Image (cartoon, helix red, strand yellow):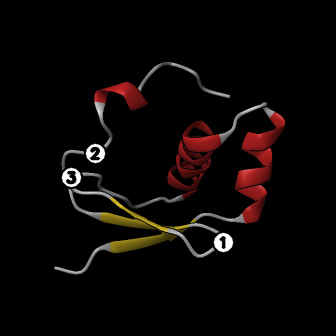
């Protein structure tokens, strides 16, 4: 089965950076923004997130991990 691809834009990265986030927190916040903008997405399937720098983050049905839901919404 093909994974759904979601592009994370530089704008999403910049919005998260303005919140003072860095590293994996920055990436997770940008991915959250990408998910919010998708109307049809099931995280029960694998998803491939493509970052502006070309980095690819792939998920499977076990994503997001429990630590990703820490309640820090922007």
Which quadrant of the rendered structure holds the C terminus? top right
Residue at the image position 60 percent from the left and 26 percent from the top:
73
Q: Is label 3 in contact with label 1 (beta carbons under 8 Å)?
A: no
Q: Which x, y percent locates residue 13?
A: 72, 53
Q: Which residue is the site of mark 3?
A: 44
Which quadrant of the rendered structure holds the N terminus? bottom left
Q: State left or right for residue 70 relative to residue 66.
A: right
Q: Residue at the far right: name it.
A: 18
Element on which disc 1 rests: loop
Residue at the image position 75 percent from the left and 63 percent from the top:
10
> Looking at the rendering, which quadrant does residue 62 occupy?
top left
Q: Which mark is residue 53?
A: 1
Q: Residue at the far bottom: name it.
A: 2
For the residues carrying marks 3 and 2, which lies nearer the camera in this image? 2
Q: CA distance from mark 2 to mark 1?
A: 22 Å
Q: Earlier in the sequence, mark 2 or mark 1?
A: 1
Residue at the image position 66 percent from the left and 71 percent from the top:
53
Q: CA distance from mark 3 to mark 2?
A: 8 Å
Q: Is label 2 in contact with label 1 (beta carbons under 8 Å)?
A: no
């Amino acid at each position: 089965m093909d994974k759904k691809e979601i592009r994370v834009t530089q704008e999403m990265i910049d919005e998260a950076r303005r919140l003072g986030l860095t590293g994996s927190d920055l990436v997770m916040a940008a991915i959250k923004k990408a998910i919010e903008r998708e109307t049809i997405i099931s995280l029960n399937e694998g998803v491939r997130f493509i970052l502006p720098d070309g980095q690819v983050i792939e998920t499977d049905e076990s994503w997001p991990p429990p630590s990703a839901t820490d309640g820090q919404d922007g």
